[in-house]
Image (cartoon, helix red, strand yellow):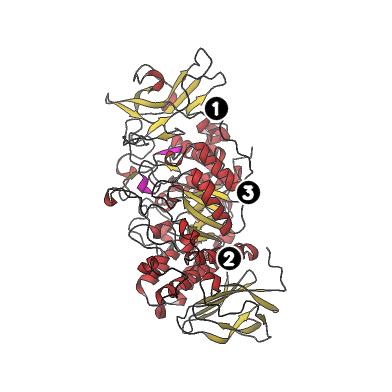
Amino acid sequence: MAEICYNGDSPDLNDFFQMEPKLRQYEGDYHRRYQLFKERLSQVEQMEGDFDQFTKGYQSYGTQKQPNNGLLFREWAPGAEQLYLTGDFNNWNKTSHPFTKKDYGKWELYLPPRRDKTPAIAHESKLKLVILTKEGEDVCRISPWAKYVTKRLDSNTYDWIYWDPMHPYLHQHARPKRPRSLRIYEAHVGIASSEQKIATYKNFTLNVLPRIKDLGYNCIQLMAVMEHAYYASFGYQVTNFFAASSRFGTPEDLKRLVDTAHSLGIAVVLDVVHSHASSNTADGLNQFDGTDSCFFHAGTRGKHSHWGSRLFNYSSWEVFRFLLSNLRWWMEEYRFDGFRFDGVTSMLYHHHGMGMSFGGGYSEYFGMHVDEDAVVHLMVSNHVLHTLYPECITIAEDVSGMPGLCRPITKGGLGFDYRLAMAVPDKWIQILKEQRDEEWDLHNIVHTLTNRRSQEGSIVYAESHDQALVGDKSLAFWLMDQEMYTNMSALIPMTPVIDRGIQLHKMIRLLTHSLGGEGYLNFMGNEFGHPEWLDFPRKGNNESYSYARRQYDLLDMEHLRYRQLYAFDRAMNLTEDKHGWLASPPALVTTLNQEDKVIVFERANVLFIFNFHPTYSYNDYRVPIGRDGKYTIKLDSDDVQFGGHGRVSKDTEFFTEPWYFKDRPHSFKIYIPCRTALVLANEDIDNCY
C-alpha cells in the first residue's frame, strides 16, 4: 500500500508567491494550514496505527460478515443510552437484540450463524436500529454505513436492506488512464430517457454510454448516485452516504455501468456531497443518536439556513473517519475514477458563501471567517485520494476563487486537480438575457473566459444542470425559445430565429471549449440543444415526469436539426482529441476587434477564428499566426452538416506570409462568414499530442 503520511516540513511557496506576490502577506496562514494538515495525518498514525484501515471504516462499521458467516454490527452513537437491532430476522422485536456499549461512543452486536451455517440475516432482509435516547425515547434509525436502502410506494421513508448477493458483480475492466484533456459528460441516471419515468442504471449502460462514447467525451460526471430521499433535490440532499440510489436499480447494476464505461475507455467521476447532509432523521444522519450533534455541529452552526440541511463537524474524529471512508468506498467498491466535490464554497467559509460577491480581494480568503477544519479536511481528502489512487481526478465546485485550491499541497494548495469555472455560464446567460447581438462586449467575454488562476486547472462549461433547471433556460432555449417546437425541421428553410440560434449555439460552445479552461463539461442533452427545461416531479407540478427526462429520441428523427448540433459537438470533441488544446497552456489572443466582432487566438498549434457579427462577412481578413506554413480547416461551424450555410470551402489551403502582424511574425488572409467559427491547423506540424 502507498505511504499515507507526509514528512515535508513546510510547503514550497516560492512559485506561488512569484505568480501572486500579494499573497505573501498571508504566508503565515499557508504555513499554519500546512502544519494542521501534517498534524491530522500524524494523529491518525498515532491513534489508529493503520491509515489504510482507518480510511476503510466500512470494513469495521455497519454490518460485517465474518468468516464463519456470523454477523458483527458496529455503530458510533455517543449520545445514545442503548442500541438494539430489529428487522425481518426477529419479527421486528425492538428489544430482543441489544448492542453492547464499548469505549468512545461505540456499540457492538454479534449474531452467530444459523445451525445450517448460513448468516442469521438473509440477503435483502429489512433492518432498523432502535436508539434509546437520553430522554428515554425509542427512535428508529438506519445505519450510517448502510450499503442499500429502498422505499415502498406507500411509505415516506426508506428501509435499510441487508445486501449480500450470492453472486456479486465482479469488475472485468481496468480503470482507463487518466485523460490529459478532460471532456466531461455531466449526467443524471434518472432522467436519461425520453420516457416519463425514472430511468435506470441498466438503461444508462445500454443506451446512453454508447452515445457518450460516440460524442467523444472521455469522462462522465455521475450525479445523484448517493442515496437521497427527495428525488427533486437533484441528489444534493444525501440521506445515505454509502448507498447507491435504489430508485435506479441495484448496486450490481451500478457496478456494471461503471465497468462498461471503463471498457469504452471512459472515466467515471462521482458527484460527492460532503458539504452537508439531509435533515431527515428517520432515514438520514440527522439526530442519529438522539442528539442534535453526533455527525454535525450542534445548534445553529450545524444548520445551513438556506439549504435547510445539516453541516458536518469536520473536527470530529469519527466524522473524519466516516467521510474519508466514504471516498474510499466509492473508489474501491464501485471503482469510480474520482470525485466532483459539491458545495466546496460552503465548506471553506463559516458564512458558507451566502451574501458574498467574492470580488477577488485576498482578505476574503483568510481570517476568522475561513473554516480551517474544513480546509484541512479537504487537504487530507485530496492527499489520501492522490496517494492511494495516483490517477484519481478531483474537482471542486467553488465560486469563491480561493487561491491555491487547485495547487499541490506541497506547493501551498488544497490539492484539487480542477475547479469549476462557474462564472462562465452565468456570463453567457446574462448576455443572452440582456443584450442584442450587436451589443456583445467581446473584451468582457474573453476576459471572463481567460480570467483564471495561473497553474490551477479549470473545468469550463457554457451551461450545466443549473442552467437547465426550471426557473432558468438552457442556451438553446434562450436562443430559440418557442420556435424549437415548430421550426427545427431540416425539411423547411431556417427562420431567422432558428438560424441565429443554431449558429450561436455552436460558436458559444466552441469558444468556451477552446479558450476557457483545462477541461470541458457538458450537461446531458445540451450537446444537441435539448428543448425545454428540467423539472423533477413535485407537488408544484402534480408529480409530473414530463420535464424530468432527456429526449434522446429527437436524435433518431433524421429530419430534425438537433442532429446537426449533435454532429457539431461530436466533431468539436474529436478535433480536440486530436490536437489537445485543453491539455495545452492557455491561449494567446492575437485579435480582439470589438467593431468587427472578431476574435482570433492560438492554442496548441491550432488557430481559432470567430466572427460573431450578425450580418458582416469579411473577405481577405488578415489573421496573425506564430508558425509559418500551410494551414487547413479542421472544423467549420458553417459546414452544412452542422446546420450551417456552407460558405467556406473545406479544401481551401492557406499559406502564411512573412508579414509581421499584431506582434506575430506571420499572417495570412481568409474569408470569414458572419456568425462562423473556424479551426485551422498547420499541416507541417504533428498535431497529435
Which numbered tag is attached to residue 176?
3
Q: Element type at marker 2?
A: helix
At label 3, which amino acid type do we have? Pro
State which mark lies toward you, 1 or 3: 1
Residue in the foreground of this view, choosing between 337 and 363: 337
Write down the residue under mark 1: 166
Q: Position of residue 228 (x, y in %)?
A: 39, 42
Q: Which residues are magenta?
A: 229-244
The answer to whether residue 415 is visible is no
Q: Position of residue 50 (x, y in %)?
A: 57, 32
Q: Residue at x 55, y 48 (%)?
A: 268
Write down the residue under mark 2: 571
Which numbered tag is attached to residue 255?
none
- Disc 3 packing (10 Å; few <14; some 14–19; many ≥20): some
Q: Is residue 318 magenta?
A: no
Q: Position of residue 53 (x, y in %)?
A: 56, 32
> Is 343 placed above or below 591 here?
above
Q: Position of residue 645 (x, y in %)?
A: 52, 77
- Disc 2 packing (10 Å; few <14; some 14–19; many ≥20): some
- Circles 3 and 2: CB distance less than 8 Å? no
Q: Is residue 13 left or right of residue 78?
A: right
Image quadrant assignment for residue 423: bottom left
